[in-house]
Image: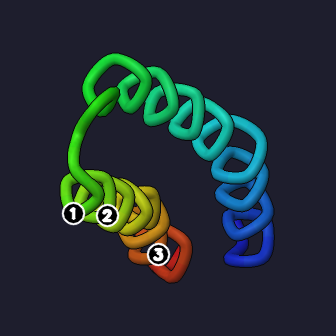
Amino acid sequence: MTRRRKTLIAAIVIVFFWLPAYALFVTGLARHVLPGAPWYVNLLFYALTGTFWIVPIGLSLPWMYREP
């Protein structure tokens, strides 16, 4: 499989499947965990969850650039 095709597959999976699922998960988690929490807990929660969405991108990069 060519690098271009791998990049397309990874982009489609990440944009259309991973990000919406992750956003729904984080929203549901925040709804149950954060009500009444102090502002610094909210800040920490959203800073961490806003950073973790990039993990599958980092994992897919070696796969995309691996030689066929």
Tell me the distance, in whole angstroms, between the alpha carbons under discs 2 and 1.
5 Å
Image coords of residue 7 (percent x, y):
70, 70
Image coords of residue 21 (percent x, y):
59, 30
Question: Which badge, 3 or 2, is on the more N-terminal residue?
Answer: 2
Tell me the distance, in whole angstroms, between the alpha carbons under discs 3 and 1.
33 Å
The residue lying at 20 percent from left, 53 percent from top is 41
Q: Which residue is mark 1?
A: 40
Task: State yes or no: discs 3 and 1 in contact (Cβ < 8 Å).
Answer: no
**Amino acid carrying mark 3 in the image:** Leu
Question: Which badge, 3 or 1, is on the more N-terminal residue?
Answer: 1
Answer few, some or many: residues within 10 Å of disc 3's Cα (few below 14, many 20 plus, some between 14 and 19): few
Q: Which residue is mark 2?
A: 43
**Amino acid carrying mark 1 in the image:** Tyr
Image: 18 above or below 46: above
Image coords of residue 37 (percent x, y):
23, 39
**Marking on residue 61:** 3
Q: Secondary structure at mark 2?
A: helix
Displayed quadrant of residue 26? top left
Image: 26 above or below 8: above
Image: 24 above or below 39: above
| Left or right position of 35 against 5 | left
The residue lying at 39 percent from left, 72 percent from top is 58
Task: State yes or no: discs 2 and 1 in contact (Cβ < 8 Å).
Answer: yes
Q: Secondary structure at mark 3?
A: helix
Which tag is nearer the camera, tag 3 or tag 1? 1
